[in-house]
Amino acid sequence: MKNNKEYQDKELEAVIPNIIELVIKKGYIIPNKDVYRDRIMKVSNIDIYSSKYEDNDFGKYFTNAITLTSERLIIPLDLEIPSDKNEYDIFIKHLINYNKMVLYDDVFGVMDLENDDQNCNLYTYIAGTGYTGNDKFLEMIFNQILSSKNKNTALENLLVGLTQNSTIIPHGPFRYDMLKKVEQLKPDLLAYILTDNFEKYKLEPNEKNKALAYIFNSQINQEYNSKGEYISAYGVYGQAQSYFNEHPEYLTMLKKNNYFGFQKLKEYGDIIYEPNPESFTDENGSFIQDPDGYTNLREEKNSSSEVLQKIKSGEHIEVLDNSGDWWQVKTKEGKTGYVHKSRVKSGNSNNHSTSFLLYDRPDFSSFSKEVLAKGEIEIVHQNLGWNFVKVNDMTGYLPTKEKKEELQKEEKKKFSFLADEEHIKPEKKKGFWDNLFSS
């Protein structure tokens, strides 16, 4: 029985009787009102029956599907609604699979949707609603993101909200439960969450502060092996370090709020973090190489954003964040922005061959071999004092200039005839965490 409500989409209203008839003919069982209402409330936290309309957006933002209150169906809008009743087969099949996925957690419905290759699929459903109640669904989504080219944006949609309307900017609330699921099910994705992107979302100030803290805390994954060596895939140098350097007031706020209860972040901010560290690239630094003779420093991570500065080829830069396709860099003039990673090279800008020791682990005691670099050195990941690099189709760790100087000083103390006795006394070996952050 219909409520006395109007439809926003008059074209859809006209074809609803045909849709209902064909759905029932295909054997789909429409749920009762309580089941339908409770499920959508659980999935998207929206009570559609409180709306003044019969047709409502399925998520908080425009998400490519709408819910019908009287008919108790969710309508995916990625397929054009046929004008001819005989052309409804594809549309009805897609509609039924989408409803099975949402209302019954039907994995076969999900698989059929993925085979249809439409926009209204598992990803838009999860990102649009923020639903975290099915780990199998989430694992499928996380694996898709990990193999995609736009990992950063895909993750942002999961954490803040997906919209298919470019005029709508998601404004939260931030999905802490979703981030917790990323930590549990696919921690490799944590490295691709870029906190500088959160400026574009209209989160409330306090919520934004807490969301950033949660992300930093998740990325600081402190793990040790039986020898006390740091073995985590993610170091604390990176986004937290850069953000604290650029926004010291944020660190002050965190301390006043006891880091929102995040213990790892508290340990980092109170004990490990050192303000304004020097650049942690290799001793030759990073530089621009572009066939046009220069590259553009962009305000945002895309080729259509505002150009802040032109950087000449061969000019050295400081890499602040090297995750994703667009790297955040600082020029010698002090300007910060983004350049495509293909334009950033590491090593000597004169491209002379360089010989160095490449280590298996970020530890001078680990196995090392001498490498003659025939091409560029690509910095894949940065930790305080060490760069994980790719060179000559090999990967390994290179110490920074500062790290090598630190070793030389220790060696000089240890073997100098002029050294005091206390200098040559063997010290208790520190774990990698201690070596990494001790002053």
Image: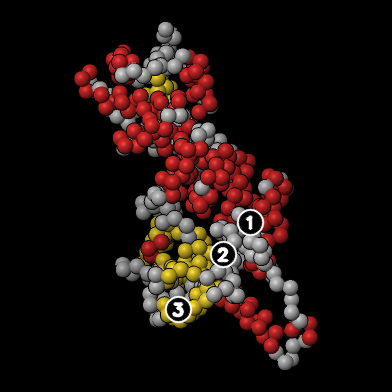
- Write the residue at 63% across / 56% down: 222
Looking at the image, do the residues carrying marks 2 and 3 touch, with CB atoms under 8 Å apart? no
Disc 2 crowd, CA 10 A, few/some/many (<14, 14-19, 20+): some
236 is higher (above) or lower (below) than 60: below
- Write the residue at 47% across / 63% down: 380
* Mark identifier at residue 230: none
Residue in front for this viewpoint, 195 or 411: 411
In the picture, measured across the screen, residue 40 lies left or right of residue 121, that is right
Q: Residue 212: give x, y in percent of width and height.
A: 59, 47
- What residue is pinned by disc 2? 383
Disc 1 crowd, CA 10 A, few/some/many (<14, 14-19, 20+): some
- What residue is pinned by disc 1? 222
For marks 1 and 2, the one nearer the N-term is 1
- What residue is pinned by disc 3? 371
The colour scheme applied to this rendered structure is: secondary structure
In this view, which residue lies farthest toward the bottom? 417
- Write the residue at 66% across / 69% down: 435
Residue in front for this viewpoint, 242 or 228: 228
Q: Residue 269: give x, y in percent of width and height.
A: 68, 56
- Write the residue at 31% across / 37% down: 115
Q: CA distance from mark 1 to mark 2?
A: 13 Å
Q: Please indicate, yes or no, whether residue 185 appears anywhere in the rendered image.
A: yes
